[in-house]
Image (spheres, helix red, strand yellow):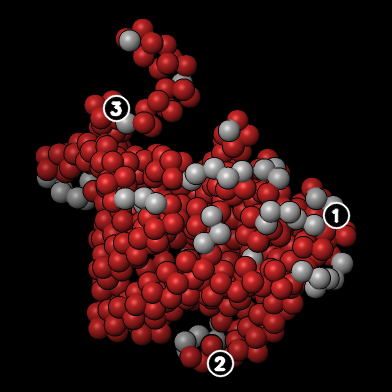
Amino acid sequence: MLSVKRALFMSVGERYVLLVTNFVTAALISRILTPKEIGVSVIGMAILTVALSIREFSSASFLIQHRELHRDDVRSAFTVTFILTGVTAAVLLVASPFLARFYSEPNLVPFFRVIVACLFLDATSNLIIALLRREMSFGKVAAIDIVAAVANSAATMALALADFSYMSFAWGYLIGSGLGAGLAFALCPHVWMFKPSLTNWRGMISFGGYNGVIAILFRIFDALPLLMLGRVVSPNAAGLFSRTLWIGQIPDKLVIGGAMAVVLPAFSAEARQGRDLKRPYLAALSFVTALHWPALLVLAVLAHPIVNIALGHQWTEVAPLVQIVAVALLFSFSFELNYPVMVAVGAIRDLFIRALIVFPISGILLSVAIVGGGLQAAAWCMLLTVPFQAYVALSFVQRRLGLRSRDIAAALWKSALVAFASAAPPLAAIGISSSGFDLSNAEAVAAGLTAFGGWSAGLIITRHPLLDEVVKIFPALRRARASAG
C-alpha cells in the first residue's frame, strides 16, 4: 500500500506539471492562432488518433497486466508495435492527399509528412514507459513525460510566435517525441528489447485483439465530432469544439488523470494476489466524485470568465458550450476507473462487448446531431450519449464485481452533497451580480474562493471519507481534529 501511495504521489505530481504546461500552451496558442488555424491541426490530430488505434493490437497494457513477463514477451511487443506503426505511417502518407481534398484543406499534406516521423519515436517511449509502470518506477515515468511535454509545448509556442501557423503543432510534436524517446532509452537502456521476435505474438494478439477493437471504436468516437464538424461545418467549428472539450475536461485531467497511471498496475497487483476489488473500486469512486463533481459544477457556473481567462475574448462563443459539456461530464465519473478494474480481473472481452454497444450507438446519435444542428447540437447531444455510456459501463462492472446499485449509491451520495455545497456560493454570487454569468475576472476569483469554502464545508458536514485523507496530508488539520475529538 505504501508503494502505491508513493507512486500515486509521483504520478499526480507529474500530471499537475503536465496540466500546467498544457494550460499555458493552450492559453498562449489560442491568443496567437485563429480558430481556423487551430482547426486544421485539430482535424489532422483527430485523423492521426484514429489511425494510431491499430497499435492497440499490441497494447502496452498487455505488458503491465501479464502475470509472468519474459524477454520474449517484451521483444514480441516491440516487434508487433513497430510493424503496426510502419503500416500506419505508410497509410497516412499515401492517404494524405485524399484527406486534404476531402476536407478542402491542402495544408493537411505537409502536416502529415511531419507527424508520421513522430510515430516510431512514440512507439519506443510508450512501450518503455509500460515496462517502468509495471515495475512501479513512476519517478522515471514522470521524468520522461515531463521532458517530452515541456519540449513539445516550448517548441510549439516558439514556432507559433515565428508564424509557423498550424505546422507549429506538428514540429513541436516531433521535437517533444524525440526528446521523450531519447530519455526513455537512457533510463531503460536495454538494447535486447529491440531484437525482433514473434515468439509470443499469439498471447499478445489474443489480449490485443479485443483491446485493439475497443481502442479503434473509442478513438473513432472521440475524434468523430471534430472530423464531422470539420467536414460538415468548417475547420473553425472543429477548432471551437476542440477548445470546448479541452476546457470541459480540465477537471477530469486535474482530478483523475494523475491517479489513472497508477490504478491499472495497482488493481492488477491486487488481482494477482487474489484480493477482492469491490471495496477499492467503491472507495475510488467516492474519492474521485468528491473532487470531480464539484469541479465540474463550478466550471459550469463560471464558464464565461474561465474561458476568457484561459483562451481570450476571441473564444467567447465557447462558454455556453462548456456549460453544457460540463453538466454532461458529471455522468463520466466512473469512466477512467472502469477500464483498469475490468482489465485487472481479466474481463477484456466484456470491455469489447461494451464498446460494441455504446460507441456505434453514440456515434450515430452524434453524427445525426451534427448534420442537423452543427456545433450547438454536438454539445447538447453529449447530454444523451454520456449518461447512456455511463449506464452501460456500470452495468458491466456491477456484474463482474458483484456490485449492487445501492452499493454505488452509498459510495456517491455524500459526494453529490459536497458538489452542491461547492456550486451554491458561486451561483449566489451570479444571482447578486448585475452581469449574470459574465462575471469579471475579479468576481470570478472571489466566486471560486467561495466555492472552495462550500466544498470544505460539504466535506465536514457529510463526514466524507475524503476528509480523512485530506487531514492525513496536512499535519495542522490532523492536530486540530485530534484536539476537537
Q: Nearer the viewer, residue 81 or 232?
A: 81
Counting from the top left corner in percent of width and height, residue 67 is at: 69, 53
Residue at point 71%, 45% (across, down): 135
Depth check, mark 3 against mark 1: the one in front is 3
Residue at point 60%, 30% (across, down): 2
Quadrant occupied by the C terminus: top left
Q: Are marks 3 and 1 in contact (CB under 8 Å)?
A: no
| Label 1: which secondary element | loop
What distance separates the C-alpha of mark 1 from that of mark 2?
40 Å
Q: Write down the residue under mark 1.
A: 190
Report which quarter residue 206 is drawn in: bottom right
327 left or right of 265?
A: left
| Label 2: which secondary element | helix
Q: Write down the residue under mark 3.
A: 463
Q: What kind of residue is marked 3?
A: Arg
What distance separates the C-alpha of mark 3 from that of mark 2?
59 Å
Q: What kind of residue is marked 1?
A: His
Task: Give the crowd class for mark 1: few <14, some 14-19, many >=20 residues within 10 Å.
Answer: few
Residue at point 17%, 42% (across, down): 427
Report which quarter residue 154 is drawn in: bottom right
Depth check, mark 3 against mark 2: the one in front is 3
Q: Write down the residue under mark 2.
A: 98
Residue at point 60%, 89% (across, down): 95
Q: Are marks 3 and 2 in contact (CB under 8 Å)?
A: no
Q: Nearer the viewer, residue 260 or 373?
A: 260
Q: Is residue 223 visible?
A: no
Counting from the top left corner in percent of width and height, residue 144 is at: 69, 50
Sequence-first tag of 3 and 2: 2
Counting from the top left corner in percent of width and height, residue 147 is at: 68, 49
